[in-house]
Amino acid sequence: LAKTTQPISMDSYEGQEVNITCSHNNIATNDYITWYQQFPSQGPRFIIQGYKTKVTNEVASLFIPADRKSSTLSLPRVSLSDTAVYYCLVGSLRDDKIIFGKGTRLHILP
Amino acid sequence: DAGITQSPRYKITETGRQVTLMCHQTWSHSYMFWYRQDLGHGLRLIYYSAAADITDKGEVPDGYVVSRSKTENFPLTLESATRSQTSVYFCASSESSSGVAYEQYFGPGTRLTVT
């Protein structure tokens, strides 16, 4: 499983766009990139997943460059309720298990 | 109610005691997982199961036992609880044949304290 590196914490303000970058230099050909969000005292929640280029859903966008050695989760116009820990995970369809790192603690300020 | 539930939500036990954490899902998902999360850390996989009667170790399986006689249930047993097992335990399930490419659905967690 490819190891991921992401910032420990980030601060931003309401209404701003937030970009969280994850490095995964050893990503394999079959690996997908998945992001989860976790609020205090709750289990993680799936946000978005991608393989290459750009993926967008109602919550976020995921940008993956051609070399796939990094990815960026983009949260548009954040609000206070987006304060949470965000995890970047990398794995393949052949893996039965995934590894969560320590994530990025995002703090949105008013 | 449909979804994934865990019980108990809170548990205090003494060192050396056996304790079982329950996990139940109503989706008939094939994959189920147990994670622990220690204060200030990410989640670490303890055990997972691909189907009934099929289980496998994760990153930190020592001191834990799992079983899966029915698709919907995946209990986690601490055979002889230690203080280092004080943690929040999350159960999750996934509908796919791989837990990676498809989203995992997490339960609300069980906060376990071992005194």
Image (spheres, coloured by chain):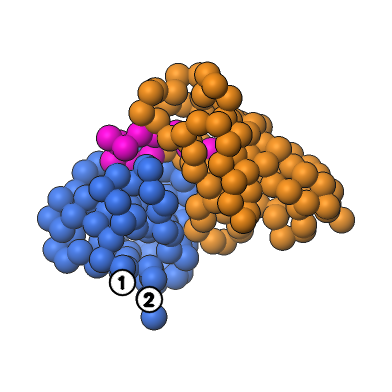
Chain colours: A orange, B blue
Identify the image quadrant of residue B93.
bottom left
Residue that badge 2 annotates: B2
Residue in the picture at 17% in, 66% down? B70
Image position of B13 with respect to A36: above or below? below
Give the Cα distance between marks 2 and 1: 5 Å
Locate residue B32: give its quadrant: bottom left
Residue B64 on the magenta span: no
Q: Position of residue B39 (x, y in %)?
A: 56, 48
Q: Which mark is drawn over residue A107?
A: none
Q: Amino acid at mark 1?
A: Thr
Residue A12 visible somewhere in the drawing: yes
**Secondary structure beneath label 1:** loop
| Chain at tag 1 | B
Are the residues tagged 2 and 1 within 8 Å (C-beta)?
yes
Q: Is residue B62 left or right of residue A29?
A: left
Q: Residue at x 38, y 23 (%)?
A: A29
Q: Earlier in the sequence, mark 2 or mark 1?
A: 2
Q: Image check: A40 left or right of B91?
A: right
In the rendered image, the vertical position of residue A29 relative to residue B93, given as above or below: above
Return the residue at label 1: B26
Name the residue nearer the viewer: A53 or A103: A53
The percent position of residue A90, horizontal first and vertical second, equals 45, 33
Q: Quadrant of residue B100?
A: top left
Q: Which residues are magenta?
A: A86-98
Do marks 2 and 1 both belong to one polypeptide chain?
yes
Relative placement, left or right, of B6 versus A54 is left
Q: Is residue B86 visible?
A: no
The three-letter code of the residue at mark 2 reads: Ala
**Quarter of the rendering occupied by the C terminus of chain B:** bottom left
* Residue extending furthest toward the bottom: B1
- Indicate whether A7 appears above or below B50: above
